Amino acid sequence: MLYSKIIGTGSYLPEKVLTNDDMSKLVDTNDEWITTRTGIKQRHIAAEDEYTSDLGAKAAIDAIQSAGLLPENIDLIILATTTPDNTFPSTAAKIQAKIKAFNSTAFDVQAVCSGFIYALTVADSFIKAGNAKTVLVIGAETMSRVIDWTDRSTCVLFGDGAGAVILQASNQDESSKPSGILSTIIKTDGRYYDALKTNSGPSMGNEKSYLQMSGKEVFKIATSKMPEVSLEAIKKANLSPSDVNWLVPHQANVRIIDAALKKISIPAENTAMTISEHANTSAASIPLAFDNFIKNNKIKHGDVILMTAMGAGFTWGSVVLRY
Ligand code: UT7
């Protein structure tokens, strides 16, 4: 049976950091409100001449090096992003050129904060169908570019960054404990389209796009859908919640994560948390947290990982894998 095995991870965070105290100089907010409501302490912000493709390319090179590969070994690049450099072409194509992975096909996936879960699902399907062998999956975002910096209810929540993984086709016996992706589930409900969106886009005119959010609605749906789809994905992998060594959730709000892990019955100490340093980096948040916990020797080979996310669309989903 073919499995998509993770053979490398990488990440990149822009140098500039904005703390909660820095935010309080921009809008009427304070460290106490942001910390207690969200768990966020700081966020990284891309430099003026630094784009999503730059962040994604740096995370990609880190992942390729950690896998001991060369860029020419990659045959597919999937970039999850909601903040592309240009409306077209895909930012994945720009990253392909930047990292010189010229033997690859490259395209973007758009599912906002669930983007990395969607991209892993697509990559796994390509590998299982025999259509790709070595896939670079990236989540990269410059959310700072679509934020209304005068809206305190949203601008304090987001940050910039990128994370990446390399998946490789691996033929394994199902009777032993296979490593790689064990199950994926992705879902969409477009009836919630307006609950979290940008005010405009290319087909609606050329207005500058800003993020608008009904925070309470997102909060409510996230705390029910993430645990629901996670339990479904664990079952699909023929495992139970007690088999999960690490939950790597989308980092949107520490209160959403706490509510989710209680419903899945995963202890807080087995949850990869990076929200205090990274804030919400949309499609980049899961691969950033995953790489961080691997590089800090917390996540180890053989560990069962549950990734889950929920975002605009609404979109949501989970991936279960053995690292
Ligand atoms: O990846 C998915 C994307 N988004 C999310 O997951 C976000 C989901 N939602 C949330 O995390 C929460 O709803 C928020 C953190 C956004 C807001 O928390 P809340 O507990 O729902 O606060 P609220 O919107 O009910 O606001 C409470 C108060 C309001 O003041 P009044 O009306 O009670 O006087 C707000 O005006 O807090 C005020 N407020 C702030 N105060 C200081 C809103 N933003 C701020 C702020 N600083 N930054």
Image (cartoon, rainbow, N blue to C red):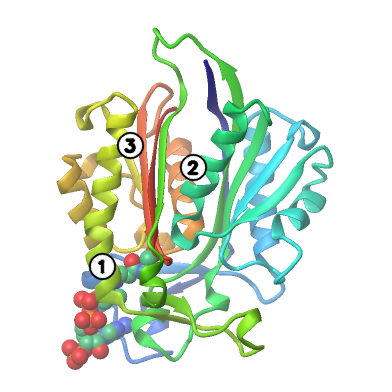
Q: Which residue is mark 2?
A: 291
Residue 158 horizontal/vertical position (percent): 44, 71
Residue 230, how many percent across, how many down?
Answer: 29, 42
Q: Is residue 302 left or right of residue 83?
A: left
Which image quarter: residue 66?
top right
Mark 3 surroundings within 10 Å by alpha-carbon count, few (fewer than 14), some (14 through 19), many (20 or more): many
Report which residue position mark 1 lands on. Answer: 219
In this view, the residue farthest toward the front is: 191
Indicate left or right for 299 with 110 as reference.
Answer: left
Determine whether the beta carbon of the residue marked 3 sits less than 8 angstroms from the nearest atom of ligand 1: no
Q: Quadrant of the C terminus?
A: top left
Query: Is the residue at mark 2 in contact range of ligand 1, meaning its CB lies under 8 Å from it?
Result: no
The image's mark for residue 40 is none
Q: Are marks 2 and 1 in contact (CB under 8 Å)?
A: no
Residue type of the residue flagged with mark 2: Asp
Q: Residue at x 60, y 80 (%)?
A: 201
**In what element is the residue under mark 1?**
helix
Q: Is residue 241 visible?
A: yes
Badge 3 marks a residue whose secondary structure is helix
Task: Characterize the local packing of mark 2: few (<14), some (14-19) or many (20 or more) Cα atoms within 10 angstroms.
Answer: many
Asked which quadrant contains residue 206, the reply is bottom right
